[in-house]
Image (cartoon, rainbow, N blue to C red):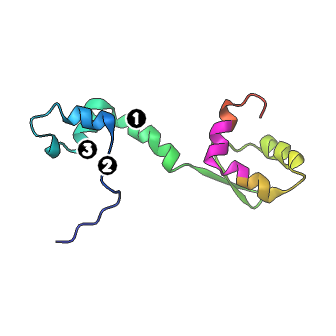
């Protein structure tokens, strides 16, 4: 029967390989077992926010909801000379989102 693979097999995962090696048959260890023992399902749910964020639609653009503020958009519009496309691009960029969280001057 055909199998549908959504993600390529993991290779070179140090923590997972080390954990699996503790079992009698490492090749039979399944992902849910690893998640249950090494991490917590709650960690996975929180991580999903990075993969599936919430969005806010404002002024004809789409922004990450966690990053959106009316005041912030206004500030970036002034900094970028009124270029809403540039503001939207920065606001929807996850790297920009993460960098701006740690940048006190942003």
Q: CA distance from mark 3 to mark 1?
A: 14 Å
Q: Residue at x 31, y 33 (%)?
A: 15
Q: Residue at x 45, y 45 (%)?
A: 48
Q: Residue 35: image x %, image y %?
A: 29, 37
What segment is highlighted magenta in the picture? 90-99
Q: Residue at x 35, y 57 (%)?
A: 7
For disc 1, the marked residue is 43
Q: CA distance from mark 2 to mark 1?
A: 19 Å
Q: Residue 93: image x %, image y %?
A: 65, 50
Callout 2: SS: loop
- Find out whether the residues at labels 3 and 1 contact each other: C-beta distance under 8 Å: no
Q: Tell me which numbered mark, 3 or 1, is placed earlier along the sequence.
A: 3
Q: Quadrant of the N terminus?
A: bottom left
- Dot 1 surroundings within 10 Å: few (below 14), some, or many (20 or more)? few
Q: Quadrant of the C terminus?
A: top right
Nearer-the-camera pick, 55 or 44? 44
Residue 7 in magenta? Answer: no
């Amino acid at each position: 029967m055909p199998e549908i693979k959504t993600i390529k097999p993991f290779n070179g995962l140090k923590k997972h390989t080390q954990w699996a090696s503790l079992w009698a048959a490492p090749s039979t260890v399944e992902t849910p077992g690893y998640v249950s023992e090494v991490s917590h399902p709650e960690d996975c749910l929180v991580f999903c926010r990075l993969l599936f964020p919430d969005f806010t639609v404002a002024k004809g653009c789409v922004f990450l909801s966690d990053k959106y503020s009316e005041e912030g958009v206004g500030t970036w519009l002034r900094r970028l000379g009124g270029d809403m496309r540039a503001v939207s691009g920065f606001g929807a960029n996850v790297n920009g989102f993460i960098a701006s969280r740690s940048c006190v001057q942003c």
